[in-house]
Image (spheres, helix red, strand yellow):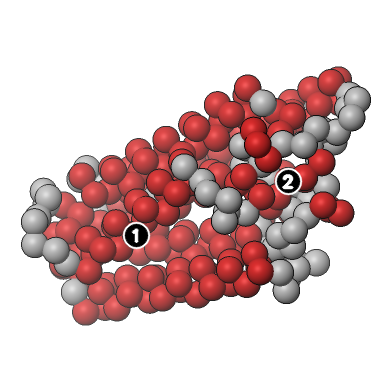
Amino acid sequence: MTNKLKLYLLRFSIKILAFSCLVFFYLTDKQGMTDFLTRGIIWKISPLHIIWAFFMAIMILHIFPNDLRSMALLKSKEKKYIPVEKYSEYDLLKYTNDQNRKAWLVMLVWLLFNSIWALIYLLGIIAESELLMLTGFYFICDYICILFYCPFRSKIMKNKCCVNCRIYDWGHFMMFTPMLFIKNFFSWSLFFTSAIVLIRWELIYVKHPERFWSGSNKVLKCENCKDKTCKFKH
C-alpha cells in the first residue's frame, strides 16, 4: 500500500471514531444534541463543539489545500498541472460537457433524496438530533466512496477513480446538506462553509477544465498516479 492509502485508512478510522462519539451522544444525551442545534451560541464548551470545530477545520483545509492532500483534490491547483502535449481542445470540450451533464444529474439526485429527509423533519417525524446523525453517517460514507465503493462513480459519472473525479470536492456539501434544514449558527455555518468549498471547486473547473481531464493533464494518468487509493475498488 502507498503512504497516501495508509493515510486515508487512518483518516477513515478517525472518522469512524468521530461517528462513534456522535452515536454515544445520541444514545446518552439526545436532548443535549437537540439543544446544541436549536439554541444560540453557548460559551460553555462541550464535546459537540469540538466535533463542530473538527468539521470546520477539515473544510478549511480543502479551501486551502496543502501538498499532503490527495491528487484528487490537488489537481485543481495550477502548480500540479502538467499538460499533455498537443491535446485536443475539441475532445476536452466534449469531455467537459459530458462530465458537467453527469455532475448536475448527481446534484439533482442528491437534492431529491435529501428533500425526503427535509419533509420527514418538517412533519415532525424526526428531530434535529436525527439530522445530525444523518450528517455523521454521510461523513462515514464520504470515505467509503473514496476507498471502497462509490455509487455516483459507478452509476452516473463513470470516471476511472477519485483522482479523475469531476465532483470530488462536492463531498462536504453532500455531507452537510441535512444541516441546511436547521436554523442555527452551528448547522448553517457547516452547510454554508461546505457551499463555499463547492463553489470554489466549480469556479476552478469552469476556468481550467484542462486540469481535470487525464487527456490534458499528465498527473491524472494511471501510470503517473502516486496515490493508488483505488486499491480496494478493483
Q: Is residue 10 above or below residue 175?
A: below
Which disc, if any, is residue 114? none
Identify the image quadrant of the N terminus: bottom right
In percent of width and height, residue 191 lies at 36, 43
Q: For the point 60% across and 46% down, which residue is it?
A: 73
Residue for badge 1? 54
Q: For the point 49% across and 37% down, which residue is it?
A: 198
Q: CA distance from mark 2 to mark 1?
A: 27 Å
In percent of width and height, residue 175 lies at 45, 52
Q: Is residue 21 above or below residue 108?
A: below
Q: Is residue 47 left or right of residue 60?
A: left
In percent of width and height, residue 153 lies at 70, 51
- Give amino acid for label 2: Asn
Q: Which secondary structure, mark 1?
A: helix
Identify the image quadrant of the C terminus: bottom right
Residue for badge 2? 164
Image quarter for residue 133?
Answer: bottom left
Q: For the point 50% across and 32% down, which residue is it?
A: 200
Asked if the residues shown at circle 2 and circle 1 are in contact, with their CB atoms under 8 angstroms apart, the answer is no
Q: Is residue 230 left or right of residue 167?
A: right
Residue 152 visible (yes or no): no
Along the line of sight, which residue is nearer the eye, 131 or 58? 58
Q: For the point 34% across and 59% down, which residue is it?
A: 54
- Give amino acid for label 1: Phe
Residue 142 visible (yes or no): yes
* Mark 1 nearby-residue class (10 Å; few <14, some 14–19, many ≥20): few
Q: If you read the primary sequence from the N terminus, does the residue marked by circle 2 or circle 1 appear first?
A: 1
* Mark 2 nearby-residue class (10 Å; few <14, some 14–19, many ≥20): many
Q: Is residue 142 above or below residue 159?
A: below
Q: Which secondary structure, mark 2?
A: helix
